[in-house]
Amino acid sequence: MTHELYENPLIGRYASRDMATLWGPHRKFSTWRRIWLALAEAQRQMGLPVTDQQIEQLRTHVDTIDFDQAAAYERRLRHDVMAHVHAYGDDCPDARPIIHLGATSALVTDNADLILIREALGLIRDRLVAVIDRLAAFAVRYRNVATLGFTHLQPAQPTTVGKRATLWAYDLVMDLEEIERRSTQLRARSVKGTTGTQASFLRLFDGDHGKVRELERLVAEKLGFRGTYPVTGQTYSRKVDMQVVDALAGVAASAHKAGGDLRLLAARKEMEEPFESDQIGSSAMAYKRNPMRSERMCGLARFVLSVRSSAASTLATQWLERTLDDSANRRLVLPQTFLAVDAVLRLYQNVAEGLVVYPRVITANLHRELPFLATENILMAATAAGGDRQDLHERIRQHSQQAAAVVKQRGEENDLLARLAADDAFQGVDLAAACDPQKLIGRAPEQVDQFVSDVVEPIRRVHRRALAAAADIEL
């Protein structure tokens, strides 16, 4: 390592080795060679003059890539696909005449991208499943712990710590559904020719349309796809890339939301992400325990959200059958979006596995607001005891405003319950019982149980193998 050149932090700091390897040059160009091999095998099956010896040479040298030689060819030819055609031909001299027969560059570039996207979506799917699993376990553990709810970032009706975690998990469940949908809808570009008309292959088969269709089917099958896109220009529609990036951005947005919530809760000292014994929160403020994992999660997620427009713009500017301005952009957008989301989910899993909850702080914060939150219950109890609902409502309103002034203007404790206890209109009400947090959380614990049973357990069953392989994340 020279330490002189810029290094992509997605590779050096954040993403997993699996995702980084998937988008690395060896995987990319060996996939190109596998596509050339699939084309030659299919052409051999369809009766074209391709020999078994040529096929065997191609198969033997799928992974023996001389990258220096390919780079030398590209410097001279100024064409990456032809550079690798020549490098492959050097490895396979007998097969050189039939490599890339009838094909255009998009045969290898587009089909390879679709293969890599398909596998990368699988990695994202497995990471989503792991995070959902961890959040669900956390939700069950804290299903009954009452906590202050917030709307408009203002105190609202209580919920539970576990119920709040199901909100984070359900966002990811919807992301999982979208990732799986995009994965199952991927098709091969297969052999479509220079402008998508398959003219070159039609000439190879002397005008036999049926053989061209069968060649297209065979190549797609050899590449592991159930079908092909019905029509393309020179490339498959960049709408596919846009849809994939949108699905990844959905994951990023969900993670950003949860990361933001955790940062707010850390500020309230109610919850914290994992914090190691030697970890330093600040170079100046030695006491700090900053939520740096959640902050990093949000920062990387924001990067993903920012690239959505690139994928959409690339689709929008593909004039007629294709322009080449998509190439440089896609070399950045596709790998880096996957790498960033992979990194986000690794962080998310690590945080979910090590969340720290402080129930006493949660209870103290809740009790400071409980008198206000219990006023609806108090109103109903006083009405049931024979009071006039409208008169009681006005009394509660006035007492609440006065108690709020004590808190805000004097910095003193909330004295609403004392004020109500001194008001004859509420003498028949058990104010303490009305303020019991467990009577204010509704069906939150039962909703946790139902969510895990109805939504998470089926995911766990379907993805049992992925969960078994999902080791705890150490960062």
Image: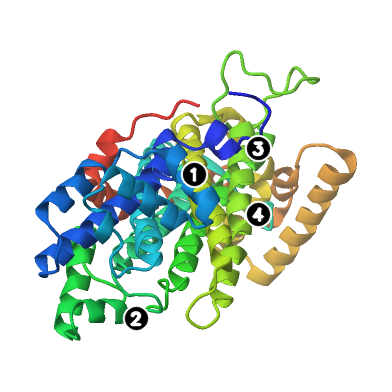
| For residue 19, side relative to residue 158 (left or right) | left
Q: Earlier in the sequence, mark 1 or mark 3?
A: 1
Do the numbered discs 4 and 2 sit on residues whose CB atoms are within 8 Å? Answer: no
Q: Where is mark 2, residue-wise?
A: 231
Q: Earlier in the sequence, mark 3 or mark 4?
A: 3
Label 2 secondary element = loop
Q: Residues within 10 Å of mark 2 (few under 14, many from 20)?
A: few
**Disc 1 residue type?**
Ala
The residue tagged 3 is 365
Q: Amino acid at mark 2?
A: Val
Between 316 and 243, the one lying in front of the other is 316
Question: Which residue shows up at 19% across the image and 46% down it?
Answer: 57
- The answer to whether 444 is drawn above or below residue 362 in the figure is below
Q: Position of residue 402 (x, y in %)?
A: 83, 52
- Between discs 3 and 2, the one toward the N terminus: 2
> Is residue 102 found left or right of 432 in the rendered image?
left
Residue 112 visible to an observer of this rendering: yes
